[in-house]
Image: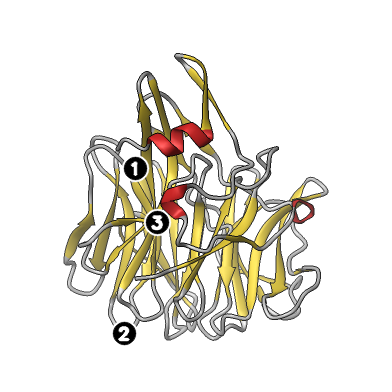
């Protein structure tokens, strides 16, 4: 896609193999109707998922850095402070600082429970990554859920009966679940970033194709039906998040900015209908836009980006969803 205005604003070609992004720009013309505003500040030390790019592609970590409580009042995020990554909460309806909710060393990602009472998170410990649950209001005291493996991206089912998560194995990533009532573990299919569908025995997830491209799939874990929802031979899509009304999927996707000899791959936010139709690009900034979550009413999207900061420091941003 030719985006000359974005190139002029954001990219300065240093040589044919390197570009420098002007992170101080808050938004580009293609985003002018989105009402993009910054929520955090540099002192919040918001984590930014790892991004790797070359002249032909971009790849990124899909861990969930942000979370919104079901009632839409609490924004949680992972912060790197004192050489440790932990979960902090801030009240979206009040001005003030953040409250620490975990006291660990290497929290990777997390989610609120469907009733808002708990937070389930993953933490790296040596070569393992284990799942824990803590109280969303008091925190600190944790219940261990899994051990002896590499588990990521936990998310509760809407009925609070299961916690779905991705387990890294020799063959790749697989979607598993933890039964809260009896502590049983079950495995379903290949994939990561599970996003359970309310009222159905199914979930959306990310799968990596044989060509190394990430796609969005829907899997019914009762009847075994699997359907590819979003796929593009030239770019990856990850981190599907279902809107509160169940009509939209929010995703992170790769995009490319081209002008003359300048070719720059980065990550942007996309949305599509729940059946994969009407894929719409929401952000166009040359900074990395990652880890998006819906507001409680589905009218806004919160995400992490280095935009708006001359030093490229990651912050939490909010934009309107006008579809």
Secondary structure found at label 3: loop
Secondary structure found at label 2: loop
Left or right? Give the position of 28 relative to 199.
right
Q: Residue 276, how many percent across, how many down?
A: 22, 62
Secondary structure found at label 1: loop
Q: Is residue 55 above or below residue 149?
A: above
Q: Earlier in the sequence, mark 1 or mark 2?
A: 1
Q: Residue 147, how many percent across, how many down?
A: 57, 58
Numbered badge on residue 44? none
Distance of label 1 from label 2 (alpha carbons) = 30 Å
The quadrant the C terminus occupies is bottom left
The quadrant the N terminus occupies is top left
Labels 3, 1: front one: 3
Left or right? Give the position of 152 relative to 323.
right
Q: Nearer the viewer, residue 183 or 265?
A: 265
Q: Earlier in the sequence, mark 3 or mark 1?
A: 1
Q: Is residue 96 above or below residue 56?
A: below
Labels 1, 2: front one: 2
Q: Nearer the viewer, residue 114 or 26?
A: 26
Q: Residue 315, how many percent across, how many down?
A: 65, 53
Mark 2 — residue?
A: 199
Mark 1 — residue?
A: 171
Q: Residue 184, how many percent across, how many down?
A: 44, 73
Labels 3, 2: front one: 3
What's the residue at 56%, 46% (across, down)? 49
Q: Is residue 273 above or below residue 245?
A: above
Question: Do we see residue 131 in this rendering?
Answer: no
Question: Do we see residue 34 in this rendering?
Answer: yes
Within-10-Å neighbours for mark 1: few <14, some 14–19, many 20+: few
Give the image's coloring scheme: secondary structure
Within-10-Å neighbours for mark 2: few <14, some 14–19, many 20+: few
Mark 3 — residue?
A: 282
């Amino acid at each position: 896609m030719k985006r000359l205005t974005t190139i002029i604003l954001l990219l300065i070609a240093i040589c044919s193999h390197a570009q420098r992004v002007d992170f101080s720009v808050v938004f580009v013309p293609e985003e002018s109707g989105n009402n993009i505003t910054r929520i955090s500040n540099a002192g919040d030390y918001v984590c930014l998922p790892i991004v790797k790019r070359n002249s032909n592609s971009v790849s990124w970590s899909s861990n969930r850095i942000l979370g919104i409580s079901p009632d839409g009042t609490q924004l949680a995020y992972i912060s790197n402070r004192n050489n440790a990554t932990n979960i902090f909460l801030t009240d979206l309806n009040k001005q003030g600082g953040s409250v620490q909710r975990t006291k660990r060393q290497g929290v990777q990602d997390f989610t609120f429970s469907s009733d808002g009472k708990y937070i389930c998170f993953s933490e790296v410990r040596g070569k393992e990554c284990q799942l824990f649950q803590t109280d969303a209001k008091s925190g600190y005291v944790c219940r261990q859920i899994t051990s002896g493996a590499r588990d990521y991206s936990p998310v509760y089912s809407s009925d609070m009966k299961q916690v779905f998560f991705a387990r890294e194995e020799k063959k790749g990533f697989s979607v598993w679940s933890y039964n809260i009532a009896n502590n049983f573990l079950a495995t379903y299919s290949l994939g990561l970033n599970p996003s359970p569908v309310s009222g159905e025995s199914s979930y959306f997830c990310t799968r990596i194709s044989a060509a190394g491209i990430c796609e969005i799939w829907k899997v019914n874990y009762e009847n075994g039906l699997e359907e590819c929802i979003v796929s593009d031979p030239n770019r990856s899509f990850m981190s599907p998040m279902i809107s509160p009304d169940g009509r939209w999927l929010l995703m992170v996707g790769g995009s490319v900015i081209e002008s003359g000899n300048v070719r720059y791959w980065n990550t942007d936010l996309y949305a599509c209908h729940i059946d994969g139709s009407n894929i719409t690009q929401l952000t166009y900034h040359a900074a990395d836009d990652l880890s998006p979550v819906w507001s409680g009413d589905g009218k806004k999207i919160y995400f992490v980006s280095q935009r708006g900061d001359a030093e490229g420091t990651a912050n939490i941003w909010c934009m309107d969803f006008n579809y």
